Amino acid sequence: MKRDEIKSCCADAYSKDVVALLLGDSYHPGGTALTRRLAGALTLTPDQRVLDVASGRGTTALLLTDVYGARVDGLDYAPANTALAQGAAQAAGLADRAVFVTGDAEHLPYEDGLFDAVVCECALCTFPDKAQAAAEFARVLKPGGRVGITDVTTDPRRLPPELLGPVARIACVADARPLDEYAGILARVGLRVMATERHDQAMLRMIDQIEARLNLLRITAPTCLADAGVDLTAAPAVLNAARAAVADGTLGYALLTAVKSP
């Protein structure tokens, strides 16, 4: 699959309503509690300008605006997500401080040195060119600016067959990297890693949540799942493989912060 096809496939998948039903508002392990921890690690202060890359339906961006007083630009590859996020900002009375656009994380439509912080939650793992995306994070940051990432981690050599292929890529697993590799990607573009944290239990909780919601939707909205292409016969094996991979350290979730050198 070509890079643009991968991006379009992921964007289309994450703009579907069934994804919100299965993953919840935040679309990532740890939910808003982990987003708050990330914001604390970045020491965000009111009126700082923050870029949320792969902003989805706006949950992270609106939290950073509402709770921390930041001015947030959200960027997502899916026009449907951009529209929903902007609508959510307007409904919350935050449209003057949270603005959403459609764009590519590997070619950010912003000038150099514009942002005090860049956040990217559960998305770097899906980008075909992670090094290019990281270089873009660094380019748009002010000197001394910080980047905060929460993301899936894997040991690709040990992933079971159930967690490989196009569906696993969309599920943020197949092209994820070990934590130290993410750190290396950032370091090579001038982003010095300040701290890393493991949050593997958050991944297990999300697997349990997906299973519970799948079982509920199987009864209450089977047509919704079928229309979205969810393979209910394959789902149990995939979820069990994911649990086993977390248990043996192959699969996990992590928080990482870094700073741009002055």
Image (tube, rainbow, N blue to C red):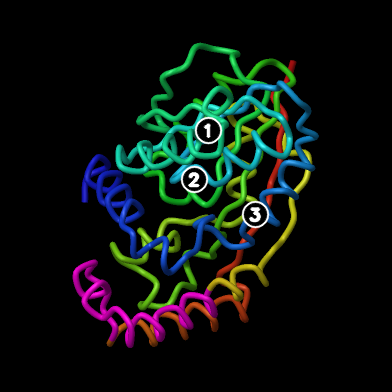
- Indicate the amino acid at tag 3: Thr
Give the residue at mark 3: 32
Q: Are marks 3 and 2 in contact (CB under 8 Å)?
A: no
Q: How many marks?
A: 3
109 relative position to 204: left or right: left
Give the residue at mark 1: 134
Residue sitting at x 41%, y 67%: 21
Q: Are marks 2 and 1 in contact (CB under 8 Å)?
A: yes
Range of the magenta residues?
207-232
Closest to the observer, 45 or 196 = 45
Disc 1 versus disc 3: distance between alpha carbons?
23 Å
* Mark 3, secondary structure of its residue: helix
Give the residue at mark 2: 124
Disc 2 versus disc 1: distance between alpha carbons?
9 Å
Residue sitting at x 47%, y 16%: 110
45 relative position to 224: left or right: right
Q: Position of residue 149 (x, y in %)?
A: 62, 44
Q: Which mark is residue 223?
A: none
Query: In the displayed structure, would residue 214 be above or below residue 76?
Result: below
Can residue 224 be found in the magenta stretch?
Answer: yes
- Residue 213: which quarter of the image? bottom left
* Mark 1, secondary structure of its residue: helix
Label 1 or label 3, whichever comes before in sequence order: 3
Residue sitting at x 38%, y 86%: 237
- Indicate the amino acid at tag 2: Leu
Q: Position of residue 64 (x, y in %)?
A: 66, 38
